[in-house]
Amino acid sequence: MIITKKKDRKKLLESTGRYNRFFLLGCSECATLCGTGGQEQIDELKKELEESGKTVTGGFVAKTGCQALGTKVELKQFKEALDNTDCVIVMSCGAGTQSAVEIFPEKAVYPSNDSLFLGNMTRLQMFDERCSLCGECVLDLTGGVCPVTACPKGILNGPCGGTKDGHCEISAEIPCAWVRIYDRMNKLGRLEEFGQTTLAAKDWSASIKPRKLNVREQKDKKSGGEEKKK
Amino acid sequence: MSSSFREALESGKFVVTAEAGPPKGTDISTLLHDLDLLKGRVDAINVTDNQSAVMRICSLAICKIVLDKGMEPILQMTCRDRNRIGLQSDLLGADVLGIKNVLCMTGDHVLAGDHKGAKPVYDVESVQLLKVVDGLNNGKDMSGNELKGATHFFQGAVVTPEATPPEPQMLKFQKKVAAGARFFQTQAIYDIDKFKEFMVFARKFPVKVLAGLVILKSAGMANFLNANVPGIRVPQELIDEIRGAEKGKALETGMNIAARHIRRLKEEKICDGVHIMAIGMEDKVPVIMEKAGLL
Ligand code: SF4
Ligand code: SF4
């Protein structure tokens, strides 16, 4: 899931200062789990805006904020409130915010959160980064522990000289990725292979931005081909 | 002309390398003075690459100055600040300047240095960089393109014998050998018996090993290294030895320890040489070498 953190409220109120009528748009998925975009947070921001003399025309927790089409349909019920709004504050991630930009091409859209990383939820409202979406996964070669993400240097071929008691040189709070990988490979009985393979430098062209993926096109082509055969 | 450092190692001589840390700023007078002291005494000079991620003069420029002094430089190259294009380009540049030795390292993280907001690069890392050097030596760049003129490097790497746990570090050592490392300079070691054990392992491979030595100035410095520098472990008896020294004799004791270690490493033929990291006390290197019976 996408991990978000609430932006400094004072700054948000300042940056949206030129607007007066706000609509607050949350998201029921990641942002709700992060405590940044659920009903509770919408109510809280509504109160703060009203206390500073602004009008809140409405608020809604979208099912999936990064899905622009679905969100647009859901928002139809708020047409009147939205017509009467000059700024939409989006309380989800940067993707959700840009769905709103797509839905409201003529309106100001502001984010209430900073988007941080793709995270694993370890406990309630506690998150760890384990994958940085590099575009070319090597987990099959590293015992399922990601060196691109878990090692601050993204080293692909074993620990640097900084491992101390199994911790990373950057911080004693980070377990050294390569000690973890070594242990996993050892448990899997794959140490020998691990010692013999040198991972080549990553092909970063797999993560040049902005990335796009169209799975539908491939499917269409496939079924199209089948039709032809018939 | 091939590397005189390599020739020294291959001759079976006990080799000594020292370190020159480029300064922060363009005043290189101290560095030039230190080089004069080391000239004719050490076999090669490592020039550090923005050591500890603190921004300084680049290693390449200082290597050229070392060359101009008639000395043999070892270009330290980290992967922290340059991507594969920058690294290869600097390597080609180093070759045409006449630099024959390169030490491939991943490099301390930017968080250790004085520009903590910098974007760390790490496009490649030490093992891959060794392969890159091997490729350039064979006339090919990293993408497999033919070079008009290959490089001529004698390439090495670093190893931390005291890393904990040691097993993953030893595996990495093997990978570096497989990637083309011809010599190793170790992180500072203080426990010679333990280092001997490491060397039993390292001797299985066709590489030369220089033991890293950092001169202890005081008991406080030893404690600092133990607490803050991963991979360095100063045994308590050495700390006690320095603490027990007469007033004002701590540094001398530290130098005696270094000289004693060098003597033992040489006499027992434990490794192929030493790499003395004086960290601001370059003038002490000849003194230690004399005490160790190397001059
Ligand atoms: S290698 Fe790591 S960052 Fe890349 S896709 Fe796999 S888990 Fe994600
Ligand atoms: S100590 Fe381990 S996790 Fe930290 S930078 Fe070095 S190899 Fe990576």
Image (spheres, coloured by chain):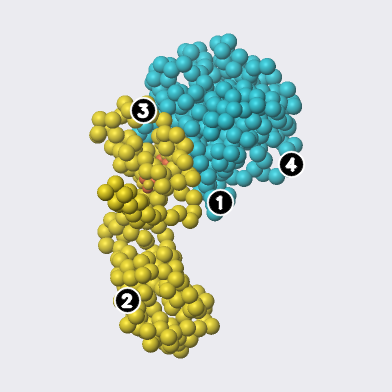
Chain colours: A yellow, B cyan
Q: Mark 3 points at which residue?
A: A195
C-alpha separation, residue under disc 2 versus residue under disc 4: 67 Å
The lab-note entry on whether marks 4 and 1 share a chain reads yes
The lab-note entry on whether marks 2 and 4 share a chain reads no
Q: Mark 2 points at which residue?
A: A74
Tell me, yes or no, whether the two marked residues, 2 and 1, touch with CB atoms within 8 Å. Answer: no
Earlier in the chain: of badge 4 and badge 1, it is: 4
B152 relative to A221, above or below: above
- Of badges 4 and 1, nearer the viewer stands 1
Callout 2: CB less than 8 Å from ligand 1: no
Tell me, yes or no, whether the two marked residues, 4 and 1, touch with CB atoms within 8 Å. Answer: no
The lab-note entry on whether marks 1 and 3 share a chain reads no
Left or right relative to A213: residue B133:
right
- Of badges 2 and 3, nearer the viewer stands 2
Query: Which type of secondary structure does the marked residue at label 1 adopt?
Result: loop
C-alpha separation, residue under disc 1 versus residue under disc 3: 32 Å
Kind of residue indicated by mark 2 = Glu
Left or right relative to B238: residue A67:
left
Q: Residues within 10 Å of mark 4 (few under 14, many from 20)?
A: few
Tell me, yes or no, whether the two marked residues, 1 and 3, touch with CB atoms within 8 Å. Answer: no
Residue B174 placement: quadrant: top left
Q: Name the residue under label 4.
A: B27
